[in-house]
Amino acid sequence: MAAAKTVAFHTLGCKLNFSETSSISRLLENEGFEKRAFDEQADVYVINTCSVTDNADKECRHLVRRIQRKSPESLVVITGCYAQLKPKEIAAIPGVDLVLGAAEKFNIVQHVKELSKGDSAKICSCDIDEINGFNPSFSVNDRTRTFLKVQDGCSYNCSFCTIPMARGKSRSDTVANVVKTAEALAATGVKEIILTGVNLGDFGKGAAGSADQENFSDLVKALEKVTGIERYRISSIEPNLLTDEIIEVVANSSTFMPHFHIPLQSGSNKILGLMRRRYKKELYAERVNLIKTRMPHCAIGADVIVGFPGETAEDFKETFSFLQELDVSYLHVFTYSERDNTKALEIKPVVPINTRLERNKTLRNLSYMKMQYFTQQNVGQTRKVLFEAYSKNAMMEGYTDNYIRISTPHRADWVNNIVNWTI
Ligand code: SF4
């Protein structure tokens, strides 16, 4: 191997990408690489890309240019969802040495060992349909909260989404493996695990992604028994996969936090149909009502996309009224943007960009009011807060069990500890 001994990473996109970057970093560190911050000098730079981010291409170019200015002799490796979707475009960016697709990102050690600075980039990528196998990943930042990937890929076909093309069909770890990892994390002092995946509720397909072997509810029940982990959160779960059983287990659990994040995307059944979502708004409302009946203090977040093609002013009004009535605590609002090779491109009429942005603003205001209202409902209650190591301007932060963010002057004895806090 060339004298490549230091490596730096940059991650774009979601928590899943962050957990994978962490695992890729550990693979290289186990081979003797020393990790550096991205703005420091390194022999190898790895950029883990995202396909959901707007301007993924522009962002990638910008980062590679930065590396080239600082360190023209360093090796540049690009991986992640965008690398799987557009390998040729990425390989054409001056300065890129290696493009690793979805199947190859966990073989990075081998690829980097064989790599030398050349004129043109090498592409190691295969057809997404050929991807099998599951690579467990978890992030370890300050040891307080860890994102643990238990599922990857998606076998749904929502008309706006490129993730199935970037990550392949739904696959997952086994319950036994996840339990083992959770036990190992507990032994290192981790207090909270956030279960992460692309379509988490579809857990149980095994590494081959074929038949249902186990289900998400089996996983939740098994993790509950792991000693040492004091908190779990479910990062996001599709409403049609959030079963009564899962809600019941969480309601009776002392370790699964009263907090759900459930993608809605639209409050109009017409738009949900065009999006090829697998539920109607009535099912969503029914799930929220069941959760709030069982756990009145539960936080519920919802993803919503505004400006999807075909969304008229009336449809948007319907979404707004639906959300206004619904007992959710906060919204994550996304402005629809066109993605190559998706079915949504065929749907007309498209919504003008300024209308999309206006709708986004309207829902963000609604989200702010919902969050205020939810926090108000909790005033006077004493809830448990897990404080994190990160501190800024002498302040520290943590979340209550039901996901209210608390900020207070830094106290070293509270880091990675659960404290009773009266809101
Ligand atoms: S459920 Fe739909 S939006 Fe989510 S990853 Fe799968 S295809 Fe994409």
Image (spheres, rainbow, N blue to C red):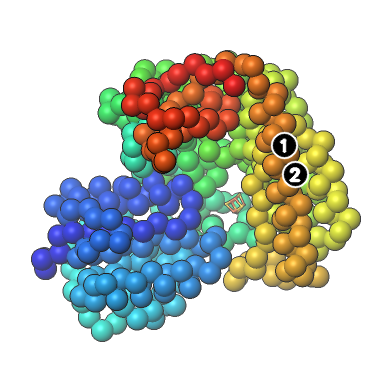
Tell me where residue 217 sits by quadrant: top right
Using the image as rendered, state which of residue 354 and residue 46 is in the foreground.
354
- Disc assigned to residue 316: none
Badge 2: residue crowd in 10 Å (few <14, some 14–19, many ≥20): some
- Asked if marks 1 and 2 touch (Cβ < 8 Å), the reply is yes
Query: Could you tell me how far apart the alpha carbons at marks 1 and 2 are, in whole angstroms?
Result: 6 Å
What is the x, y in percent for residue 368? Answer: 69, 42
Left or right side of 216 for 389 = left
* Residue under the point 69% across and 54% down: 305
Look at the picture and state if 130 lies above or below 396: below
* Residue under the point 61% across and 68% down: 339
Left or right side of 419 for 35 = left
For mark 1, what is the residue? 370
Left or right side of 5 for 39 = right
Left or right side of 361 for 86 = left
What is the x, y in percent for residue 351? Answer: 77, 67
- Disc assigned to residue 366: 2
> Residue 123: in sight, yes or no?
no
Q: Secondary structure at mark 1?
A: helix
* Residue under the point 58% across and 26% down: 402
Badge 1: residue crowd in 10 Å (few <14, some 14–19, many ≥20): many
Q: Secondary structure at mark 2?
A: helix
What is the x, y in percent for residue 220? Answer: 50, 26
Quadrant of the image containing the N terminus: bottom left
* Residue under the point 28% across and 25% down: 187
Q: Residue furthest right?
A: 314
Disc 1 residue type (three-letter): Lys
Quadrant of the image containing the C terminus: top right
